[in-house]
Image: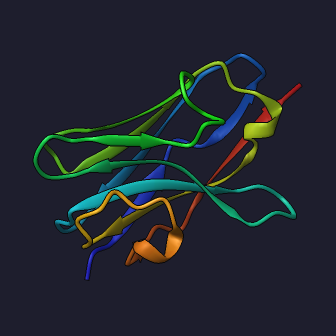
Amino acid sequence: QVQLVESGGGLVQTGGSLTLSCAASGRTFIRGWFRQAPGKGREFVAAIRWTGDGSTVYADSVKGRLTISRDNANTMYLHMNRLKPEDTADYYCAAGQGLRIGVRDDEYDYWGQGTQVTVSS
């Protein structure tokens, strides 16, 4: 069983920056970030291959503004720049044992509890 703990959410103004962290208790092949805005379904944000080359995949809506990264301490990050009000959501980190960098939530086996990001206009 892999446990994931997110941190770093908060309130920020439009155009501002935040960095989310996701600390994991075990090893998996892929990690990702998803978000769920009020009244909407959960959507894919970004994912990274945890082993090997660290390949990444991004949703079109966040390319160039949000960056996923990893460190050697088994922690994943989401660096969020030029934030917009439409980025307001609960952000969840996820981990999976599949080899493909998944963009669907059913490709992930473990989930964090979520951290809230609010971007004011």
Give me the residue at 78% from left, 21% from top: 14
- The residue depicted at 60 percent of the width and 37 percent of the height is 60
Front residue of 58/33: it is 58
Tally the marks: 0
As drawn, 2 above or below 75: below
Eyeballing the image, is 20 above or below 64?
below
Query: Where the N terminus falls, by quadrant?
Result: bottom left
* Percent coordinates x, y for residue 56 in the rendering: 34, 41
Q: Position of residue 119 (x, y in %)?
A: 77, 33
Q: Nearer the viewer, residue 99 or 14?
A: 99
- Residue 77: x and y in percent read 38, 40
Image quadrant where residue 96 sits: bottom left
Question: Based on the displayed image, in which of its 4 quarters is residue 101 positioned?
Answer: bottom left
Q: Is residue 99 left or right of residue 81?
A: left
Residue at image point 16% right, 46% down = 73
Q: Is residue 111 above or below residue 31?
A: below
**As rendered, which of 31 and 111 lies closer to the eye?**
31
Q: What colour scheme governs how the chains and residues are painted in the rendered image of this protein? A: rainbow
| Residue at the bottom extreme of this rendering | 1
Q: x, y (%) of residue 5?
A: 41, 61
Measuring 25% from the left and 73% from the top, which residue is drawn there? Answer: 97
| Residue 103 left/right relative to 62 | left
Left or right: 10, with 111 as reference point = right
Q: Nearer the viewer, residue 78 or 64?
A: 64
Quadrant of the image containing the C terminus: top right
